[in-house]
Image: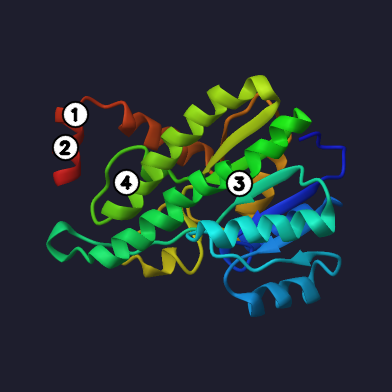
């Protein structure tokens, strides 16, 4: 996505958190926005306060039919959609002893299966045009398994893997696949945590950092934290024996 060119960008999960802040940041750069999510009231408020020219298209990313209908509506109004950025996420801390299988399925659907639906829905048009961008929101929690994060971390690990595979497959067609792997960002989701979250930043700061990295076609991973991400990458490559010993302490 050329930083100087004005694009039509579909932000899914724009109602709250990083998605909301990113939509505002992209609008300030002059891009045309399509705002999607399940909470229409939140989207309407976002539009009225910050992005008057945006198109609102409600969508449930965990429902493939809902996503297909939303895409068709967005295309009928806006024409070509240059970039699709999915910031939708669901999170609930859990341990193995207290797994809620219903919530696990919802978390997996929102964080991972939705990405398959997005690829299935938008890639054919992008292939025909020979260009496009799809951006998913992963997490540093997807680098390695972390305590209390079973369904979320597992979904994000799968999403990172999927994005890597999709980038390899779609680069020849001019389609730029990226993954955002945030560290700790102050949102409604992180408010659920009862542990210390180092190097936490606001959603607004995260959004500015993300927006600044979207235009580089050679960049796959977008980071919101430099130092914290390096630390998590270091943990990722620790020998298993040492990793498990450290995490048990």
Q: Which residue is found at the position 70% from the left and 63% from the top?
A: 35
- Which callout, 3 or 2, points at the residue further toward the start of the chain? 3
User: Given contact means CB atoms under 8 Å apart, are the residues at marks 3 and 1 in contact?
Assistant: no
Image x and y of residue 160, in percent: 44, 37
Disc assigned to residue 121: 3
**At numbered mark 2, what does the secondary structure look like: helix, strand or loop?**
helix
Label 1 with label 2: CB-CB less than 8 Å: yes
Position of residue 140 measured from the top left corner of the image (x, y, whole percent): 42, 43
Mark 1 vs mark 4: in front: 4
Q: CA distance from mark 1 to mark 4?
A: 17 Å
Quadrant location of the N terminus in the rendered image: top right
Circle 3 residues within 10 Å: few <14, some 14–19, many ≥20: some
Residue 174 image-quadrant placement: top right
Among the two numbered marks 3 and 1 on one chain, the one whose residue lies closer to the N terminus: 3
Which one is closest to the eye, mark 2 or mark 4?
Answer: 4
Q: Gap between marks 3 and 4, in whole Å?
A: 24 Å
Q: Earlier in the sequence, mark 2 or mark 4?
A: 4
**Residue that carries the numbered disc 1 in the rendered image:** 240
Q: CA distance from mark 3 to mark 1?
A: 38 Å
Which residue is located at x 83 percent, y 55 percent?
Answer: 78
Give the CA separation, mark 2 to mark 4. Answer: 17 Å
């Amino acid at each position: 996505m050329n930083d100087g060119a004005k694009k039509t960008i579909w932000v899914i999960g724009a109602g709250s958190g990083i998605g909301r802040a990113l939509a505002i940041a992209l609008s300030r750069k002059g891009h045309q926005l399509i705002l999607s999510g399940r909470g229409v009231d939140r989207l309407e408020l976002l539009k009225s306060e910050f992005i008057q020219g945006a198109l609102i298209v409600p969508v449930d990313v965990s429902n493939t039919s809902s996503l297909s209908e939303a895409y068709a509506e967005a295309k009928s109004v806006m024409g070509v959609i240059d970039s699709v950025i999915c910031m939708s996420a669901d999170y609930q801390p859990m341990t193995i002893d207290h797994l809620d299988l219903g919530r696990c399925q919802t978390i997996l659907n929102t964080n991972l299966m939705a990405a398959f639906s997005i690829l299935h829905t938008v890639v054919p048009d992008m292939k025909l045009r020979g260009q496009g961008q799809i951006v998913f929101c992963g997490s540093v929690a997807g680098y390695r398994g972390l305590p209390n994060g079973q369904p979320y971390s597992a979904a994000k690990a799968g999403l990172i893997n999927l994005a890597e595979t999709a980038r390899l497959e779609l680069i020849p067609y001019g389609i730029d696949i990226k993954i955002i792997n945030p560290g700790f960002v102050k949102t409604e989701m992180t408010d659920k945590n009862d542990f210390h979250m180092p190097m936490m930043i606001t959603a607004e700061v995260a959004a500015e950092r993300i927006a600044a990295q979207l235009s580089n076609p050679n960049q796959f991973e977008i980071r919101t934290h430099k130092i914290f991400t390096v630390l998590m990458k270091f943990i990722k490559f620790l020998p298993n024996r040492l990793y498990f010993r450290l995490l048990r302490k």
